[in-house]
Structure formats: C-alpha cells, structure tokens
Amino acid sequence: MGFQICALSLIRADPKSRNMIDVQAIQDALKQFNLDGWLLYDFRGTNPLARRVLQFAEDAVGSRRWFYCIPAEGEPKKLVHRIESGALDTLPGKKTVYLKWQELEAGIEHLLAGIDKVAMEYSANNANPYVSRVDAGTVELVRRSCDEVVSSGNLIQLFEAVWDDEQWAMHQEASEHTNAAFKRAWSLIANRIRAGEEVTEVSVQQEIMQHFADNGMTTYHPPIVGIGPHSGDPHFEPDPANDTVMSEGDFVLIDLWAKMDRPRGVYSDLTRVGFIGETVPKTYEDVFRIVAAARDAGIATVKDAFASGRPLQGWEVDQATRDVIEEAGYGEAFIHRTGHSIGQETHGNGANMDNLEMHDDRLVLPSTCFSIEPGIYLPESGIRSEVDVFVDENGEVHVTGGELQTAVIPILAEY
C-alpha cells in the first residue's frame, strides 16, 4: 500500500501538469511494478487507453501505426510513419521514422533494446477485456524483441483512473444532486398516485433528466426506472414502446447516474428501491436486507484492507458481497459483478469489483472511485442497492451519495 500512495503523490504533486505526460512518474511506477518498460501503441484509435494516458485530443486520430516506449530508465523512444511523422511530436523522446514494413519491425526491435519485460494494453487469454486493446498480432511482433509482455492494467488506472482534488470535489457535488434526484422522483410518484393522475416509468425518467438539467449536470444515457418485472432486468430501458403505468402496490427500482457538466467531470452512480404504498410487504424487505448486508460486506472489505495497509484487488470486494448472497440461497439471482470503476465515464478504466464476469486482479488504488451494487433479480422484481466508494490519497474510504439505504422506501408514507 505504501507503493500506491508514494506513486500517486508523484502524479498529484503538480496539478498544472495534468495535461502533460509525466515521464518520471511513469518510470517510478515501472520500477515499483518491476517492469522494464511500457510500450504504448495505437492504430486508428483502437487503443483509447494509450491515447488518454498520452493526453491525445479526442479527435486526433491518425491513419498509421505509432509506438511510444517509456523505459524504466532513460529517455523514451518514438516510432512513427513518414506520412504522419509528427504524430508524437508533443511527447518527449527520440524519434524514429519508418516507411516500409521492414523498417517498422526493425524500429520495434530498436524501441525494445535492453527491455526484457514490457507492459502493454494486453490481457493474457483476454481475461480483462477492458484493458485488452492491443491485437494479438502486434503482441506476437513485440514478443520477437523482448522476453515477456504483461498487462498494463494497474499502470492504466494509476495514470488514467486516478482523480485529482478538483475531480473529487466535482464528484461530491454531483453526489448531492443525484441523491436529491431520488426525492424528486419519489415525490412525483406519490403526488400523482394520490391525485389519481397517471405516472409512468418514462415520466419519472423525464423528471430525473429535468433535475439533472436544472442542476448543471449531464449524462450519457437516461436513468433506469423499472417497476415489477422490469426491475428484475438490470439493464432495463424504459421507452414509449414498453412504458408501464405505475399503481399502488408496485415495486420500483431507480438507477441513475450523472456528472457535473464541466471539463473532466466525474460521475455519481446510485440505485435505490421503493414500494408504492404505506407499508412494504415482508417479501421485499427480506430480500432487501440480504442485498444491503452484501453491500455493507463489500464496503467493510475495502475499509478493512486500507485500514490495515493490505493491498486489495477488485475481485476480493466482489467475493465478499457474493458470499453473503450465496449463503442466503440467492447466488443464481446475482447475475452481474459487484461494481465498476467510475470516472469521466460511468464505467471507468480502473479496477472493477468483479470475480464473476472476470477475475479482476487489479489493485484498488487510492484516489480512485468505484461502485458497490449487489442485487438479487427474481421474475417478479429485482432489488439492487448501489453506492459509490472513493478511496482518497491517504487511504481513507468515503461512501458517497447520502445515507445508505437501510430498507425499501414506503413511497406513500414518506413522500
């Protein structure tokens, strides 16, 4: 854990340099990960992770292959095509220009001279598809010039998924608004039901989107609002074709996500459940208690690891939540990972809390954020509780988005 905080302090030391690549910080991380170098590669925008690490503009996509090699010691090296010889001119290091394919292969060998173990956006057996951006043929070509190609997964999140103080502040601001969005949604449902007026999944979705607009927020997709069986579909999307009218006695799940509409804004992503009535049936409460216990077990796993200084991998958090649900007999009904990295995209490029869809062995790093959102999905309803967890640069664990939901909300009693 000392390694993580030390490396992060190098990245965060000078906020003014956040738009510039910090070669020294990368080299320090390479040494601490026992790597000889990092080979970043792109062809026509196929490796957005490398492009983001190197601070490329979104629209700066060329048509020829380039390679950028950062050794653990010494000066970086560049390999670019003659037609686009300036592709990496904003980056430090010596440049080699190729034209023929033979020159490309010789150039890669030159880049990797003295490097035995190199990191790339690669994952053995495609175990981590979020990181696996370099095609197999390119990996084969690189292996001709070095002994070992390993995943850059932890490097990627260290230099791409880490937040600075400004982003942490924007997340907290976003969390206040996403938390308030639930009150607005539950109130709309309650008021219309009492007035005998129609309220549908889409109308609640639209109310939440208006709340985001009113508070200077943006999102890549409208929220999930699902009642009854629709709540049992983790990725249900209400639209006019499947829109359903809500009635007293319906179970409701709302999953919403948004960020402040500012450069480098980061998301808040929350899920809560309610029941349209004065009291909540025991069947829903019983399942919710299991889900909440699983959520709390995941949070406790993160807090315990950082309090003790123990390195924590993403899969461990998933397993902690999954064990609770499996022990309660609902293992087959928990059909997704426990959580995902959160950043400028809702699903960011850091470690996921996952030991189901993949065995994510990336470290949970300070100054990164992720969701913890276990769920139990049955034919009649789905119950999920989602919170966001941010580990600050000192290893303190913050659960954001307001108070933890401790019971299914009786909407007509509380709103």
Image: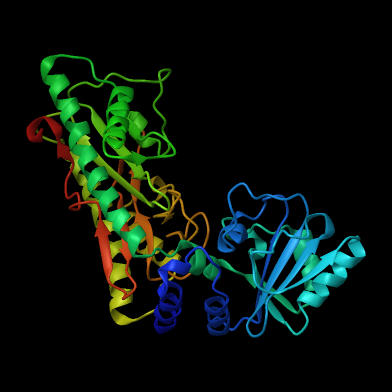
Instruction: Inspect this view and state whether residue 377 appears.
Output: no
Q: Is residue 141 above or below residue 233?
A: below
Could you say which is closer to the camera, residue 295 or residue 49? 49
Q: Residue at x 26, y 60 (%)?
A: 399
The percent coordinates of residue 257 (x first, y second) are: 35, 43
Give the percent coordinates (x, y) of residue 194.
11, 20
Q: Quadrant of residue 333?
A: top left
Q: How is the image coloured?
A: rainbow
Judge left or right: residue 270 versus residue 248: right
For residue 384, side relative to residue 188 (left or right): right
Q: Position of residue 246 (x, y in %)?
A: 25, 22
Please state which of residues 168 and 188 is positioned toward the viewer in this rendering: 168
For the point 29% across and 23% down, the residue is: 203
| Quarter residue 189 falls in | top left
Which of 279 and 127 lies nearest the eye of the viewer? Answer: 127
Asked whether, in this view, residue 242 is left or right of residue 73, the answer is: left
Marks counted in the figure total 0
State whether residue 267 is above or below residue 380: below
**Residue 65: x, y in percent?**
77, 57
Image quadrant holding the N terminus, namely: bottom left
* Location of residue 270 with respect to 88 vertically, above or below: above
Q: Is residue 286 visible?
A: yes
**151 relative to 371 in the view: left or right:** right
Report the quarter where the C terminus lies.
top left
